[in-house]
Image (cartoon, rainbow, N blue to C red):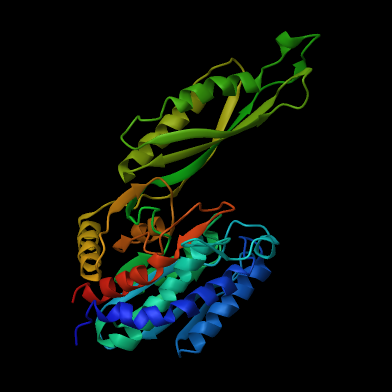
């Protein structure tokens, strides 16, 4: 039996009030990265939702970040699909009580509504609808919930590395762009740390005896910023500078944090070499620079496999009665990790939303059912 597009809205629309009520519940749980109690509370809510439907629950314990989860159901088909979401948000404890989910015109506004609690709920609903209407379209469907996506992805990376070999396709449930676009490419990203050592001296009595680490770093900052555009899509941003101890002391130390991004994997080594060359170049006699850090995420490239997925997603949207575009973005997500693990990936499949990480973060209520239907139909049509 083939899943027909026209059956999906009729199945999902009666469930929309429940979805909105559940979104209110999950947005009422403070779950900032590192707040284990909140991560665990939201995880228990999700576990209960899955257990009520007979799904398997696998925990990935982490004492620091909080446990990750994989919620799995099985069908009678062939493909194995991982839907990636995360439990953590950026909002501090107390935000949920201060700003509960509310309806503002056509929008549902609340902390984490788009990033990523709406995406999490949509993943659960997409799996539920496929299990009910088209179990023959998949072998395994898993909703994977990470606990530290908004920070360093330490626990999430380990969980995804353990799971990825068991799947054929990954769909990342980050929110769609504000115009509805899905995400077909993401830049790789990383942070380089430059630490300059100079020599302290009294700035008024004998400044000539000092080596000004801040001055040396200032020259390097200019050179680092000049790396922007060294290759198409390469960006470099010196975002943090610190150094010195007092205004009357020639500073013996200075430090910079440098964000770097690249569209192409082959450009990452070129950027690394350029940063290291700048650090090695003497800008002030006696100053020495040490480089640490580096790339954290490889790019999610728009490969031929991704292009085929984009074309299929557009065709599914056409069947459902709306137009779908795709875009590339400079931000990183689980899509970067999963692409680096060899899976074909699409991202931005959650509800349409905006103002991420801000006080007016929202999702468009009218996008909820179409986007869940899109995910379900995409899975059913892939390799059908």
Camera-side residue: 254 or 118? 118
Q: Is residue 207 above or below residue 243?
A: above
Determine whether 130 is above or below 259 in the image. below
Which quadrant of the figure has residue 292? Answer: top right
**Quarter of image, res 42:** bottom right
Q: Residue at x 26, y 71 (%)?
A: 378
Question: Looking at the image, how many numbered discs can be counted on the residues?
Answer: 0
Q: Residue furthest right?
A: 205
Depth order, front residue of 215/302: 302
312 vs 196, left or right, is left
At 77% from the left and 13% from the top, the residue drawn is: 203
Horizontal and vertical percent position of residue 295: 45, 45
Query: Residue 167, located in which quarter of the rendered image?
Result: bottom left
- Quadrant (top left, top right, bottom left, bottom right) of the N terminus: bottom left
The front one of 105 and 21 is: 105
Q: Position of residue 110 (x, y in %)?
A: 57, 62
Taking the view exactly as shown, the residue that stands out farthest to the front is 105
Q: Quadrant of the C terminus?
A: bottom left
Q: Nearer the viewer, residue 230 or 280?
A: 230
Q: Is residue 213 left or right of residue 103?
A: right
As drawn, 256 above or below 136? above
Expressed as whole percent of the image width and height from the top left, the position of residue 192 reads 51, 39
Examine the rendering and report whether any part of residue 159 can be seen.
Answer: no
Kindly tell me whether residue 334 is visible in this rendering.
yes
Residue drawn at 47 percent across, 44 percent down:
190
């Amino acid at each position: 039996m083939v899943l027909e597009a026209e059956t999906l809205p009729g199945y999902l629309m009666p469930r929309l009030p429940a979805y909105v009520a559940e979104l209110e519940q999950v947005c009422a749980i403070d779950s900032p990265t590192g707040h284990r109690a909140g991560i665990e509370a939201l995880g228990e809510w999700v576990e209960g939702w899955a257990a009520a439907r007979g799904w398997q629950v696998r925990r990935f314990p982490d004492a620091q970040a909080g446990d990750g989860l994989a919620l799995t159901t099985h069908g009678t088909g062939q493909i194995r699909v991982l839907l990636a979401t995360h439990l953590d948000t950026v909002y501090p404890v107390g935000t949920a009580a201060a700003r509960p989910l509310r309806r503002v015109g056509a929008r549902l506004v609340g902390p984490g509504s788009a990033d990523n609690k709406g995406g999490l709920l949509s993943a659960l609903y997409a799996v539920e609808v496929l299990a009910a209407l088209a179990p023959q379209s998949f072998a395994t469907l898993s909703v994977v919930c990470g606990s530290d996506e908004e920070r360093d992805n330490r626990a999430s990376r380990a969980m995804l590395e353990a799971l990825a070999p068991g799947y054929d396709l990954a769909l990342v449930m980050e929110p769609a762009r504000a115009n509805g676009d899905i995400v077909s490419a993401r830049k790789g990203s990383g942070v380089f740390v430059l630490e300059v050592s100079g020599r302290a001296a009294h700035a008024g009595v004998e400044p000539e005896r000092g080596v000004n680490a801040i001055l040396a770093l200032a020259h390097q900052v200019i050179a680092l910023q000049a790396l922007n555009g060294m290759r198409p899509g390469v960006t470099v941003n010196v975002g943090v500078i610190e150094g010195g101890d007092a205004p009357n002391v020639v500073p013996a130390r200075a430090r910079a944090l440098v964000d770097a991004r690249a569209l192409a994997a082959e450009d990452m080594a070129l950027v690394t070499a350029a940063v290291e060359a700048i650090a090695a170049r003497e800008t002030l006699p006696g100053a020495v620079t040490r480089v640490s850090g580096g790339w954290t995420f490889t790019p999610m490239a728009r490969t031929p496999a991704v292009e085929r997925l984009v074309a299929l997603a557009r065709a599914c949207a056409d069947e459902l009665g709306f137009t779908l575009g795709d875009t590339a973005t400079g931000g990183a997500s689980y899509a970067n990790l999963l692409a680096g693990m060899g899976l074909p990936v699409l991202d931005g499949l959650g509800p349409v939303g905006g103002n991420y990480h801000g006080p007016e973060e929202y999702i468009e209520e009218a996008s909820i059912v179409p986007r869940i239907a899109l995910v379900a139909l995409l899975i059913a049509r892939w390799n059908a």
